[in-house]
Image (cartoon, grey):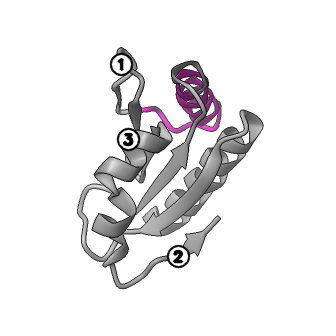
């Protein structure tokens, strides 16, 4: 039987593979399970253009569906400077470098006690 923590790990593996398939840049993973009831982990990645962000987001969503993780929501595809994919256990942010620097989600969430990886 899969525990929620194991399901989060399995989902993270799918996310990392999907991001790597489409050549995401500067991928990091943060464990937020100790401070969030919404997700166990956050993945942040950069893309090189709005078209690249859309491709990253679509691949993450498609691969997650194939693995049995139904996306709860995908936000930001219209402007595509920052696209959020909510997979329940894992929330994925794909961002243009300028938006990523401006919003600095890493600093906001890095204060968590259990950072689990820099990929």
Q: Nearer the viewer, residue 16 or 108?
A: 108
Which label sits on residue 1? none
Task: Tell whether 42 sits left or right of 13.
Answer: left
Label 3 crowd (10 A; few <14 / some 14-19 / many >=20): some
Extreme residue in the bottom direction: 113
Q: Earlier in the sequence, mark 3 or mark 1?
A: 1
Q: Which residue is mark 3?
A: 99
Q: Nearest the camera: 62 or 22?
A: 22
Element type at mark 2: loop
Q: Which mark is residue 116?
A: 2
- Counting residues from the start of the chain, the first of labels 2 and 1 encountered is 1
Q: Which residues are magenta?
A: 53-71
Is residue 86 in sight in this rendering?
Answer: no
Tell me which residue sits at (39%, 63%) in the image: 106
Location of the N terminus by quadrant is bottom right
Q: Residue at x 40, y 29 (%)?
A: 81
Figure quadrant of residue 59: top right
Q: Nearer the viewer, residue 73 or 106?
A: 106
Q: Is residue 15 above or below residue 10?
A: above
Separation of marks 2 and 1 at Cα, in angstroms? 30 Å
Q: Tell me which label, 2 or 3, sits earlier in the chain.
A: 3
Q: In terms of secondary structure, what is the magenta stretch mainly?
A: helix
Question: Which residue occupies the extreme top position in the image?
Answer: 78
- At x 33% / y 78%, what residue is drawn? 112
Question: Is mark 2 in CB contact (under 8 Å) with mark 3?
Answer: no
Measured Cα–Cα span from mark 3 to mark 1: 12 Å
**Most foreground residue, 31 or 4:** 31
Q: Which residue is mark 1?
A: 79
Distance (Cα) linking label 2 and label 3: 23 Å
Which of discs 2 and 1 lies nearer the camera? The answer is 1
């Amino acid at each position: 039987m899969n525990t929620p923590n194991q399901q989060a790990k399995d989902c993270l593996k799918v996310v990392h593979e999907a991001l790597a398939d489409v050549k995401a840049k500067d991928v990091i993973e943060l464990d937020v399970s100790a401070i969030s009831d919404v997700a166990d982990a956050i993945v942040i990645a950069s893309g090189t253009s709005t078209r690249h962000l859309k491709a990253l987001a679509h691949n993450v969503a498609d691969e997650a569906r194939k693995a049995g993780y139904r996306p709860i929501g995908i936000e930001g595809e219209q402007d595509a400077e920052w696209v959020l994919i909510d997979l329940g256990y894992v929330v994925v942010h794909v961002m243009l470098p300028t938006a990523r620097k401006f919003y600095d989600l890493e600093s906001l969430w890095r204060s968590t006690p259990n950072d689990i990886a820099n990929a």
